[in-house]
Image: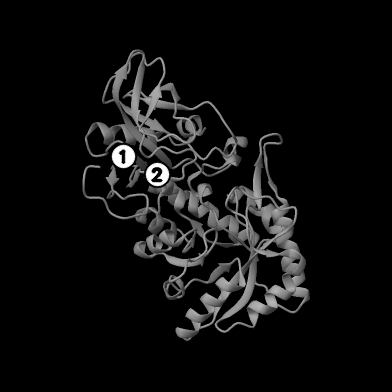
């Protein structure tokens, strides 16, 4: 989806991938992150947020919570992370990044409350009074009061499978009152998801009904006397969506793919400033008839715009070939390059798509110096940001 944009706006990343792989420094099944480009994208994002009065939390699951990437993002001015689950929280802490938001999308499970509070998040999202009570008890034991966001939902809101839940908008004031009465917590805001989604028909990023519910909840709670300082509106976020999100009522947003230039808006609009800064690097394992099979343990495409033709750059001359992948539900051992004339085993294969590294068996590595040509390749990490020392 982003391959031709990569070639047009950041070709040195593809060239660096081939160089590092051919030199034996970069293994197949690795997501390679361009730190120079990531810094530039983050600076664009931070400045756009400043102009529109938005707070930021970085979402790192898409790039596998790579610690070198997280540190680069923090040094460029985006210093706190949203942690989509507890694995994310621990990875962020290992990287030395400050924890900003925990509990959205995945709620803390039983026994995790003390660790969540000890991480020092600015906010914890709660879907239920029971979860709020558990977080409050942990905060009270730690001698602090933990600000929480209420996950709110309306009768017409729409969710991806497994993402639903929260306090019904029709009784949000009463629910907030009960949570506020608990020891150790205070209601400081609201959230929902997804608040922005791509429209393939209009080729724009549009506010959802979920966003309207979020704004209504904040308005009602303020009218009821609650001090609501955070209206957190995640979903399909990049610098090009900030103006609309702020105008609609958001105070905080959570860019992830936007930081590495792989949102639908970057497909719709060539003028978007963030360039692609992450590629999936693999190699040809073997040939079978006219097809070439490519290692794909880390392969996963977030098909936010539905099905589309997938291609990859192959070999030292980076020729573009069409790629066939396993159907949904199948294990990704290999991808297949169709009609692979001229392709040889061992050839480098470079993909550029919208990743979700944290659900794969892929590794990540970051590289600095792409623009100068003095490549500084950093260490290898698994999909949860832990160092890898073996060959797998």
Residue 323 lies in quadrant: top left
Question: Which quadrant of the view contains residue 371?
Answer: top left
| Closer to us: 385 or 69 | 385
Task: Report x, y in % for residue 134.
Answer: 52, 76
Look at the picture and state if 314 lies above or below 171: above
Residue toward you, 301 or 341: 301
Answer whether residue 123 is visible to the viewer in this image.
Answer: yes
Quarter of the picture holding the C terminus:
top left
Q: From what the image shows, is residue 305 above or below residue 115?
A: above
* Residue depicted at x 58% and y 42%: 272
Residue under label 2, please give it: 360
Q: Which of marks 2 and 1 is in front?
A: 2
Give the spatial CA distance, label 2 vs label 1. 30 Å
Question: Which one is earlier in the sequence, the residue at label 2 or at label 1?
Answer: 2
Residue where numbered disc 1 is placed: 373
> Tag 1, which secondary structure?
loop
Up-down: is 346 above or below 66? above
């Amino acid at each position: 989806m982003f391959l031709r944009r990569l070639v047009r706006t950041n070709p040195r990343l593809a060239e660096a991938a081939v160089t590092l792989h051919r030199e034996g420094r970069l293994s197949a099944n690795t997501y390679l992150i361009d730190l120079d480009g990531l810094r530039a994208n983050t600076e664009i994002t931070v400045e756009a947020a400043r102009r529109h009065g938005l707070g930021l939390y970085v979402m790192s699951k898409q790039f596998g919570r790579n610690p070198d990437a997280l540190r680069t993002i923090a040094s460029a001015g985006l210093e706190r992370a949203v942690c989509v689950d507890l694995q994310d929280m621990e990875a962020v802490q290992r990287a030395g990044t400050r924890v900003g938001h925990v509990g959205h999308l995945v709620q803390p499970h039983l026994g995790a409350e003390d660790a969540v509070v000890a991480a020092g998040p600015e906010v914890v999202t709660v879907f239920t009074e029971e979860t709020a009570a558990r977080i409050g008890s942990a905060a009270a034991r730690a001698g602090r009061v933990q600000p929480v966001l209420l996950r709110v939902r309306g009768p017409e809101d729409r969710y991806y499978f497994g993402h639903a839940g929260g306090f019904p908008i029709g009784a949000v004031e009463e629910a907030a009152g009960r949570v506020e009465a608990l020891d150790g917590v205070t209601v400081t805001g609201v959230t929902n998801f997804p608040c922005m989604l791509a429209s393939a028909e209009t080729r724009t990023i549009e506010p959802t009904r979920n966003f309207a519910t979020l704004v209504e909840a904040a308005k009602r709670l303020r009218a009821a006397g609650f001090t609501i300082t955070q209206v957190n509106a995640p979903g399909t976020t990049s610098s090009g969506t900030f103006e609309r999100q702020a105008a609609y009522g958001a105070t905080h947003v959570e860019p992830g793919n936007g930081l590495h230039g792989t949102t639908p808006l970057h497909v719709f609009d060539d003028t978007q400033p963030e360039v692609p800064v992450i590629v999936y690097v693999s190699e040809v394992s073997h040939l079978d008839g006219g097809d070439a099979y490519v290692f794909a343990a880390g392969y996963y495409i977030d098909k936010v715009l539905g099905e589309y033709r997938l291609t990859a750059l192959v070999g030292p001359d980076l020729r573009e070939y069409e790629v066939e992948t396993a159907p949904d539900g199948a294990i990704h051992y290999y991808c297949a390059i169709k009609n692979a004339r001229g392709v040889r085993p061992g050839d480098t294969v470079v993909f550029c798509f919208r990743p979700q590294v944290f659900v794969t068996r892929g590794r990540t590595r970051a590289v600095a110096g792409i623009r100068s040509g003095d490549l500084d390749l950093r260490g290898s990490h698994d999909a949860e940001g832990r160092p890898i020392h073996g060959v797998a």
